[in-house]
Amino acid sequence: MNDTRTCTRKSGTARRPLLPLAAACLLFGLSVCAQAGVDQNHDEVLYIGDVGDDTVRGFDSKTGAFLGDFVQSGSGGLSGPMGLIFRGGKLLVSNQNFGLDNGEVLRFDRRTGDFVNALVPAVDPNAPYAPRGLVRAPHGNAIYVADIGTQGDDCSNQGRVAGYRASNGQYLGDLDRSGFAADFHPRGLVVGPDGLLYVSAIGCPIPPDSLFDPLAGYVLRFDPRTGKFVDVFASNATIPDLHRPEGLVFDEHGDLWVTSFRADADDNDKILKLSGKTGELKRVLPLAAPESSGGTRAYAQAILFGPRGDLFIPITGGDATTAGEVRRCDVKKKNPSCQVLVPADGTLLAPFYLIFEHTDPSTLEFEDD
C-alpha cells in the first residue's frame, strides 16, 4: 500500500481469517467482550478502522490488548472504513465503498456496533465519491465529509468538503473553495480552537496527469458558519516537509499536529507539530529512519490525542515489522517518547482513522471525565 493512493478503490489487500468474537473472548480471556461488539464499559477503549479487513476494532488503550471487532467485517456493506465519530447513540463511519461508484456515510449502534442504516447512501446523487475525514460541524445539526475526488485517470474531478444534515443525511452543499486556486483533494478535517474548520489537502495524486504533484501539501481554513474559504494556514511552500498530509489534531496548548509523508527514499515519514497561531513548524516527530540509510518505512494516515494527552499513531503501512502497529507517544516532553501499544502481529492490517468514545466529534479532543 502506498500513502499516495487516492483511495478510490482497493486492490490486492490480503485478508486474514476472522476470529469469531466469542472465540476471541475465550482465547484472550476478555471478560469485557459483549455478546455483540465490544463492551464500552471497559476503560478507554480505542476504536480503529482497518481498511485491510473492513472492520472497526477495539483495543485497550492502556495495555494494547485486542478486545474484539466492534463493527464486524463488511457489516452494512462496510468496505474501506475512513473517518469515525460518535454522535448521540450512533457511530458514524465514512465508507469508501471500494469497487462501487460512490462512497457513503454509515451508522452503527454506539453500544453494540450493529449496523443501523446509511445516513448518506451511495445511491444519493450527492453522496461523496471517495470520503476520508469526517467531523461534526461546530454549530448546528450538520457533519462535514472530506471527499478526495479523483474519479478516473486524471485530476479533472476536484475534491470537495460536503455538508450533510446529521439527523437525516440531507445534502447541505459544499464548502466554497473558490478562493483556493490550486488542485483541491481534501483528506482530513478538524475544528480548531478558533472555531474554524481545518482541512488537510494534497495536490493531484494521479501520476499520468500532467498536474501530478506528489509533494504538494496544504492545511486550509474555512469558516463553518459561512462555508467560505479563509486562508492557507500552512503548505509545503512554507514548510518543505509538509507532504501529502491527512490526519490533523490540536493538542491541549492549541498547537496543530499533522501527518506528513516522505518525499523520497532519502526522506522519512513523520508527524509535524505546527504553531496553532502562526502555522510555523515547531517540532518533527520521525516515524522511521530513511530507507536509504537502512530504515524501515512506517507511515501514518491519521492520528489522535487520547487519555493523559498522549498521541496515538496507527502505522498504516510500511513492511511486516511496522504495518499495523499502534504507537502511543508522550509528546508533552521536550524529547517525545513513544511505545508500541499494538505490535505489528497481524491484528491490524491497514489501520486508518481512530476514535475514543470520549472524543469530541468536532474538535477531536479527548474529553476526560
Image (spheres, grey):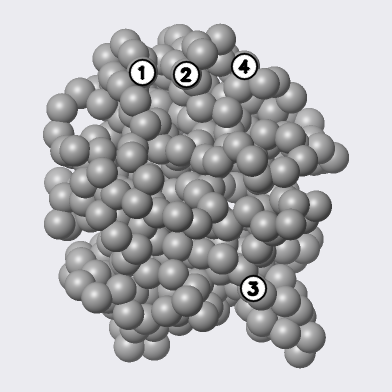
Label 3 close to label 1 by CB (< 8 Å): no
Instruction: Point out the tag, 2 or 1, that comes first from the N-terminus.
Output: 2
Instruction: Point out the tag, 2 or 4, that comes first from the N-terminus.
Output: 4
Q: Residue placed at 44% from the left, 70% from the top? A: 235
Rendered view: 129 above or below 2: above
**Callout 1: 10 Å neighbours few (<14), some, many (20+)?**
some
Dot 1 falls on a residue whose secondary structure is: strand
Q: Residue placed at 63% from the left, 54% from the top? A: 204
Q: Residue placed at 42% from the left, 79% from the top? A: 238
Mark 4 sits on what residue? 77
Mark 2 sits on what residue? 126
Rendered view: 25 above or below 287: above
Mark 1 sits on what residue? 171
Label 2 close to label 1 by CB (< 8 Å): yes
Label 4 vs label 1, nearer the camera: 1
Q: Amino acid at mark 1?
A: Tyr
Q: Amino acid at mark 2?
A: Asn
Q: CA distance from mark 2 to mark 1?
A: 7 Å
Q: Nearer the viewer, residue 248 or 347?
A: 248
Q: Nearer the viewer, residue 312 or 216?
A: 216
Mark 3 sits on what residue? 262
Dot 3 falls on a residue whose secondary structure is: loop
Dot 4 falls on a residue whose secondary structure is: helix
The picture places residue 300, in percent across and down from the top left corner, at: 57, 60
Q: Nearer the viewer, residue 82 or 324?
A: 82
Instruction: Point out the tag, 4 or 1, that comes first from the N-terminus.
Output: 4
